[in-house]
Image (spheres, coloured by chain):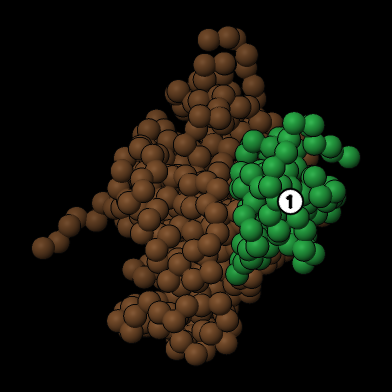
Chain colours: A brown, B green
Amino acid sequence: MSGAVHEADVAVVGGGLVGAAIAWGLARSGTRVLVLDEGDVAFRASRGNFALVWVQSKGLGMPEYAAWTKLSSDLWGQFARRLADETGLDVAFRRPGGFHLCLSEREVENRAAMLSRLHNQSAMVKYGYEILDAAQVRGMLPQIGPEVAGASYCPLDGHVNSLRLLRALHAGMQQFGAGYLADHVVEKIAPRDGGFRLTTRHGEVRAAKVVLAAGNGNARLGPMVGLDIPVRPQRGQIIVTEKVAPFLDYPIVTIRQTDEGSVMIGDSVEEAGWDTSVGTGVVSAEAERAVRMFPHLARLNVVRTWAALRVMTPDGFPIYQQSVSSPGAFVATCHSGVTLAAVHALVVAPAIARGELPAEQYIAFSPRRFHVPATA
Amino acid sequence: MFRRLPDADGSSVEVTIDGRSTRVRAGDTVAAALLSAGVLASRISDVSGAPRAPYCMMGVCFECLVTVDGVGNRQGCLMPVKPGMRIDTQHGKREVGR
């Protein structure tokens, strides 16, 4: 280990979308921030995700998560404008509303029942959505195939260019003075002198506060500062086609056309540990459903497939918490780093700067929810 | 711009290039046929708007993308010409339905 020592007000562990959004928010409020990131070999969901800013269907079992997601969706427009104004990078945020397409009457019924359960929860945030029949869907999406039986549509759904978002956050946070240390895997975090010392192969970082935003790495880091962060990798596989002229004005939960013209097909879910390999079984199933939804896709050339690892908690909802035993240590982790980027930058970062995640907003997201004794 | 080697001799087939009936040499690839027919800009780049021409002639560079028989983004250098083939230079992105 070399003897380099860096100091900061806040050390953010993780330079993906969650860490970069929080670091951006902290840096623009004048906090001295240092981001410690892994190298290019990191498992980086921020480079492999599907790039939806998605609201519909989220929060069944935790209405606070639905409200949190809606808040982020509502803040996304101003967030994207600020990034564009400050960095010159247009992250291509669009919110035309999004569809979940169903390929049978049974799927439509199940979808309607699920959304009805979601919106009937007490304390559920209010927003509109519609269950559409095939003719109504065709009115908005003329290219659908004959097998589409219906859809759910929510006007709050949108999408973004998530690679450009990551770049804009990094450019923006550095504009505001944040430091960025690549290839600085954090080996150890020790509470020390009312702050924290973070040990890396390349030296030490001393900071008054530390934010764990290391995705699946948080499971290892949390206990060092008294936080239990039960996250695990969950694989998703994505297909990308050649770029084509714009034809799809709306994001579909499993299909979207990027601002540059590629069609992305995705949304698979597998428990595969740390294995990021792509298998023809899953991508064939994804492609088959996509072609039934939009038959024209069958003629497009696929240029790439990849797998990435979501950062998944036992109930699928995010974790935000300040350590009780080591105050000043925070964790922020979720599997929706794109959707929630706006709240991470504009709401979570200022709260961390103030030193408190107020209970009325964050209590539901505490990992203590995983320790309620199981009942029969 | 391009001239045949003197020993290159052979039969020809008729294709259409942007709707014009054209005789090209049998056995040529679509990209070679375009170049020998004097069609140097086989596509207009969607990214820059610049005219582009076949370059590597071996399937690597993707500069020779053209629409063949109604299907866009075909690599012209990898397809032999066939009698009656419709070859269209491609302006901008391929469209999803063709």
Position in image of residue A362 (x %, y %): 47, 58
Position in image of residue A137 (x %, y %): 51, 84
Q: Nearer the viewer, residue A24 or A157?
A: A157
A169 relative to A137 in the view: left or right: right
Q: Residue at x 49, y 26 (%)?
A: A186
Position in image of residue B92 (x %, y %): 76, 59
Q: Residue at x 53, y 62 (%)?
A: A299
For label 1, the crowd category at 10 Å Cα-Cα, with few meaning under 14, some 14 to 19 and many 20 or more, is: many
Position in image of residue A366 (x %, y %): 39, 53
For the image shown, how many numbered marks are present on the structure? 1
Whether residue A321 is visible, yes or no, is no
Q: Quadrant of residue A276?
A: top left
Label 1: state its secondary structure: strand
Position above or below: A367 against A101? above
Q: Amino acid at mark 1?
A: Val
Whether residue A155 is visible, yes or no, is yes
Q: Residue at x 61, y 27 (%)?
A: A182
Q: Nearer the viewer, residue A43 or B95?
A: B95
Q: Nearer the viewer, residue A92 or A125?
A: A92
Quarter of the image containing the N terminus of chain B? top right
Quarter of the image containing the C terminus of chain B? bottom right
| Residue placed under numbered mark 1 in the picture | B24
Position above or below: B43 against A57? above
Q: Residue at x 73, y 38 (%)?
A: B9
Position above or below: A186 against A315? above
Q: Quadrant of residue A110?
A: bottom left
